[in-house]
Image (cartoon, rainbow, N blue to C red):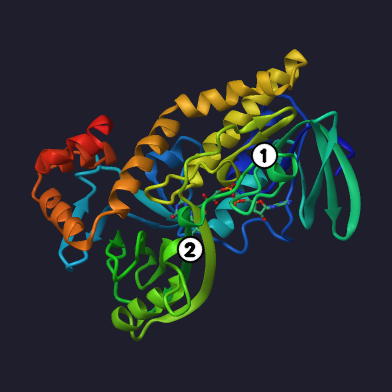
Amino acid sequence: MKSRYDVLVIGGGPAGALAAQTAVDKGLSACIVEKRPAIGSPVRCAEGIGKEALTEFIDPDPCWISAEMTGATIVAPDGFVMQLSSKMAGGKVGYVLDRKIFDRELVWRAADAGADVAVKSRAAAPIMENGVVKGAKIDHAGKMTSVRAEVVIAADGVESKFAKWCGIDTTVPVREIMSGVQYVMTGIDIDPESTVFYLGNEVAPEGYLWIFPKGPKSANVGIGISGKKSGEGHRAKDYLDKFVKKTFPKGKTIEYIPGGVSVCRPLECTVADGLMLTGDAARVVDPLTGGGIYNAMFTGKLAAQTAADCIGKGDVSKKALMAYDKAWRTSKMGKTIDRNYHIKEYLIKQPDEKLNEIIHSVSKIDMTEFTTLNLVKEIIRVNPKLVLELGALA
Ligand code: FAD
């Protein structure tokens, strides 16, 4: 690690890796600092991603794909099962990744392209001059060192502190933090090619429970519930344990993964003088699904592209970097987040009876392509009185 770079990236997740790779591809010097001793571990993710989304950034490689999904199943609160096949999803659907290897591969690529990488290196404070971010103080295996940069890209995930230290309010309301727990389980009877989502207040209040296959008899079995629904005796783990005991009594848990996901709106502004926020640090997780891998890669890449333009023009002011903020907000990803936030807010207010009604009605529709937008359209079509609540989204 040197004492000066064009771009300093804080965090070695998908956002940080894509930011560093893009920066060096644009001819800049870049360094990723990662506080953990190893990239990609421990995993805090169910590892699901759409095929199309993934291939926008990287060609699929069996080395880091645990399983290929051809369908999805939604289980309504009353136990009714709705199947979605790949035919309904335009022949695509998705993958369940092995993020221990996937995240490492992304950082490896950035390193091969010329980025420096420092693990066990925690950004402990920003270097600020006259309100402008000029780098970071890094705790590198117990030794404090200063690294200066033209632009700092904060890709420090859901637990992000860097932006807060720079004066940006990154608070997520408790009700919009999904409290999550996941078990990697083996020895369970599952459909190895289909993800399963369980909905309902008994199973996962204001959230959902998932089974994401990792092989013929193994899967990520996890749950996310609203932070405001969590309390003594009814935490996410309590709900998950109840489900696992009933559904997979003979299954074996080989990994325990706790973790939070923000399902709030993105931050009001994702740049400051000399600073850009990406991925979970910018709160750009899809509020409906909790998926953030694609959004992290998308914003990481875009941030570095804008940083390169601005550094080239000698202007890394907030005003100049706003081009990034505007670009992601007006992108398909930004619009999807906006739309899915409304859908999430609508769905979490519905009692189980209403969720049953919606799932039953949607299951009767012959959808040639299952997308969230089509889903909204169909929900409105079968529940015309919802036009006032969801009409603007369709
Ligand atoms: P991260 O991947 O969190 O990377 C941030 C990195 O920054 C970490 O390695 C961290 O150690 C490092 N860091 C933090 N602070 C510092 C510091 N001060 N100095 C240096 N390094 C620092 N998304 C999906 O798309 N599909 C899913 O199926 C899915 N399931 C999920 C299930 C659970 C239980 C959880 C919790 C999340 C899930 N997500 C899922 C969300 C997904 O994991 C994140 O959106 C994604 O990892 C965000 O990438 P990122 O690069 O922004 O942050």
Furthest-bottom residue in this view: 250
User: Rounded to the nearest whole Å, what is the CA distance between mark 1 and mark 2?
Assistant: 23 Å
Check disc 1 and report the residue beneath it. 168
Does label 1 or label 2 sit earlier along the sequence?
1
Query: In the structure shown, which secondary structural element does the residue marked by tag 1 occupy?
Result: loop
The quadrant holding residue 206 is: bottom left
Query: Residue 223: horizontal and vertical position, in percent?
Result: 41, 66
| Residue holding disc 2 | 179
> Disc 1 residue type?
Ile
Residue type, mark 2 in image: Ser
Percent of width and height locating residue 24: 71, 31
How many numbered marks appear? 2
The dot on residue 393 is none
Image position of 140 (left or right of 101): right
Number of other residues with Cα within 10 Å of mark 2, as a class: few under 14, some 14 to 19, many 20 or more: many
* Mark 1 neighbour density, 10 Å: few (under 14) some (14–19) many (20 or more): some
In the figure, 202 relative to 158: above or below? below
Q: Nearer the viewer, mark 1 or mark 2?
A: 1
Q: Where does the image place residue 293, in percent across and percent down from the top left?
A: 50, 47
Do labels 1 and 2 touch, CB within 8 Å?
A: no
